Amino acid sequence: MISKTSKISIIGAGNVGADVANALVLLGKCVRVVLFDRTLSKAEGQDAQLTRKIAHGSRP
């Protein structure tokens, strides 16, 4: 079970990793999601996208 205080790390910021991170953020299942990828810009891009979703109230 995932607690609200959990920190979840996702290896790979491709389609699957981004979808998992997005679902965790939208469902409010954890406090912190960390994305790792070989390409730093890909992980940073996904981070920026998730941050915008949270800022615009896409999180329940």
Image: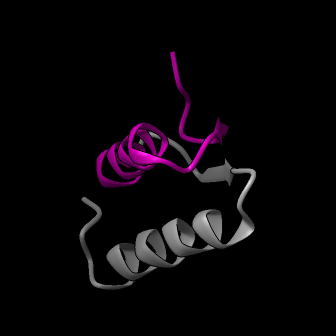
Find the magenta span and give its range. 1-28
Q: Residue at x 53, y 43 (%)?
A: 30
Whether the magenta-drawn stretch holds residue 12 is answered as: yes
The picture places residue 45, in percent across and down from the top left corner, at 53, 74
Name the quadrant containing residue 7: top right
Q: Residue furthest front?
A: 39
Name the quadrant containing residue 6: top right
Q: Nearer the viewer, residue 11 or 34?
A: 11
The picture places residue 3, in percent across and down from the top left corner, at 56, 30
Whether the magenta-drawn stretch holds residue 60 is answered as: no
Name the quadrant containing residue 39: bottom right
Residue 60 as seen in the image, left or right of residue 23: left
Q: Is residue 26 visible?
A: yes
Q: Is residue 21 above or below residue 3?
A: below
Q: Residue at x 55, y 50 (%)?
A: 13
Q: Residue at x 24, y 69 (%)?
A: 58
Q: Is residue 41 above or below residue 32?
A: below
Q: Residue at x 38, y 84 (%)?
A: 55
The picture places residue 5, in percent across and down from the top left corner, at 64, 41
Q: Is residue 27 above or below residue 49?
A: above
The colouring scheme, among rainbow, by chain, secondary structure or one colour, is one colour
